[in-house]
Image: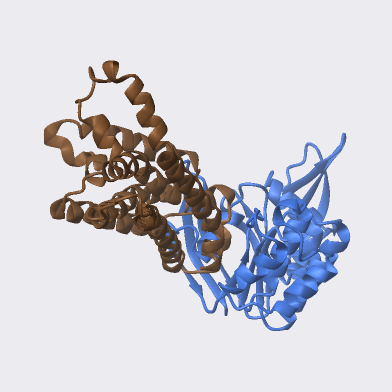
Amino acid sequence: MKKEFLEMKVRFMLTLIVMISLFFLVMSLKNWGIEILEKNQADLSKFVGKGLLEKLKDWNFYIYSQWYGKNLGQFIPIIGIIFAFPLFSREIENGTIEYLLTRSKRCKVFTEKIFVSTLLLILSIVALCLLPLIYTIVPSIDFNTRYVPTLTIHAVIGSVIWYSVAVFLSVIYNDQVKPLVFSLAILAITTVLGMVKSLSFFNTYSYIMNAKNLAVEDILYSSISAVLIYTSFFTFKNREF
Amino acid sequence: MILRVENLSKVYKNGKGVKDVSFELKKGEILSILGPNGAGKTTTIKCIIGLRKASSGTITLNGNFSYLPEEKRLYRWAKVSQMIEITKGYVELNEEIALGILKDLKISLLEKIANLSHGQLTSLYLALTLSQKADLYVLDEPTWGLDPLSRSYVLEKIKEIALEGKSVLYTSHIVEDVEKTSDRVLIMKDGYILEDGYIDDIKEKYVTVRARKDEEVAGYLYKETSDERVYIIEREKAPPDHEPASFSMIVESIMRGDGK
């Protein structure tokens, strides 16, 4: 277990540092961004409704749309993939899988890797989702946290489903590049497919960024993740090295 | 009996692999598998330890094992001391033995794995493998890449293990190493076992025969000069004017496998 923590440490820390920096950058750019939009109001009105500028001045709208809706929201699947793609493929590519599998049972190796990486993934996603809460202590900012729990649940489930896809690819491939590239390719394809109304469940972004309670999607995506993880375990257990 | 392999076959998609391999390993015995590249040594070992699945046959292992792979790869980000700690998290390790081997082979505990040479990495892997408490030590090319002093040291350690009643199964390309340390040897080629026996018995079994080039001899061709051929053949089939054969001559001839 200790080895898994040591291996995940850098990825976990880097993800947090990059995303926290992005959060403060986005927040600090609020006034500057609005200023630019005001200067170009005439051109802007061709593309967006008149009320957008006024809405953006409101901290609630700005945080929900620009953090949950854009920056963090768009990175959620990618963070899931980053946490998962090297899990097994790096051991296979570097040849250390032989060290591991001849010193520990396959079931234990799989469980420890999945436990540590899922734990750190969920911790980082929850931390990033709760980051805007620090604005609740700033008196000049009125941040309504009503949607935070739902968005956090969606972010966790949304990250775990892409984590599960990358775990499966990490188990079946012998190098680290293929799980990463194919995970991102599947993400791109499903997002495009999800633009078709009848295939909308493919678009995990619309789920992750949605602040409504979506129990059916919660269950559907969690079940898909569970099936993928179980399939990965079964594949890993029976794979030859 | 610590290990019994019965009719083991492992066939890959390209048709290569091991075919109908059977042997036993007793407690306290050192058994070496010799053979050219692609003979099936590593496949046999990987089937025994469960990294590969046998196509057919049965493997009975009575006890636990410690394994040194052919490619000695460890975590490049870790230091030597961390590698010991990590290994302790997985298996029962005699840390005193591990540290002793590392000290004798002059490997610093503070050195990063990424900075170790091939020989040093092999030494560290050996320290981790030999210090693990096990009934069977499976070593794939344990002395490959080691300097002569380290090689002798490792061979002594392997002998010590057997003296403690543990069994050793190892593969090697170095016939001298095998002759120095092993009790028994399996000679493999193209997935088959060509010879299985105690080293002294094998040396007793074969002799050298010199023959004219136009003579047909039922043996393994060892070498050919301008006017004669030298064969390794079974003593009972040899003419009276035969000469003794060294173990390396026998192994080399069988592995080359010409003219039986």
Whether residue B126 is situated above or below residue A182 in the rendered picture: below
- What is the number of callouts on the image? 0
Q: Position of residue A65 (x, y in %)?
A: 28, 40
Colour basis: by chain
Whether residue B59 is situated above or below residue A86 in the rendered picture: below
**Which residue is painted at 49% across and 67% down in the image?**
B6
Q: Position of residue A111 (x, y in %)?
A: 41, 65
**Which residue is painted at 23% across and 17% down in the image?**
A46
User: Relative to A152, is A15 on the left or the right?
Assistant: right
Q: Position of residue B197 (x, y in %)?
A: 68, 68
B63, B174: nearer the viewer? B63
Residue placed farthest to the front in the image?
A: A140
Whether residue B18 is situated above or below residue B67 in the rendered picture: above
Report which colour depicts chain B: blue
In the rendered image, which quarter contains the N terminus of chain B?
bottom right
Report which colour depicts chain A: brown
B136, A165: nearer the viewer? A165
Q: Is residue B247 visible?
A: no
Residue placed farthest to the left in the image?
A: A198
Whether residue B25 is situated above or below residue B123 in the rendered picture: below
B191, B253: nearer the viewer? B191
**Which residue is painted at 39% across and 52% down in the image?**
A128
Q: Is residue A46 visible?
A: yes
A218, A130: nearer the viewer? A130
User: Relative to B255, is A19 on the left or the right?
Assistant: left
Q: Position of residue A157 (x, y in %)?
A: 28, 54
**Which residue is painted at 38% across and 30% down in the image?**
A33
User: Relative to A225, is B171 on the left or the right?
Assistant: right
Give the quadrant of residue B251. bottom right
Give the quadrant of residue A106. bottom left
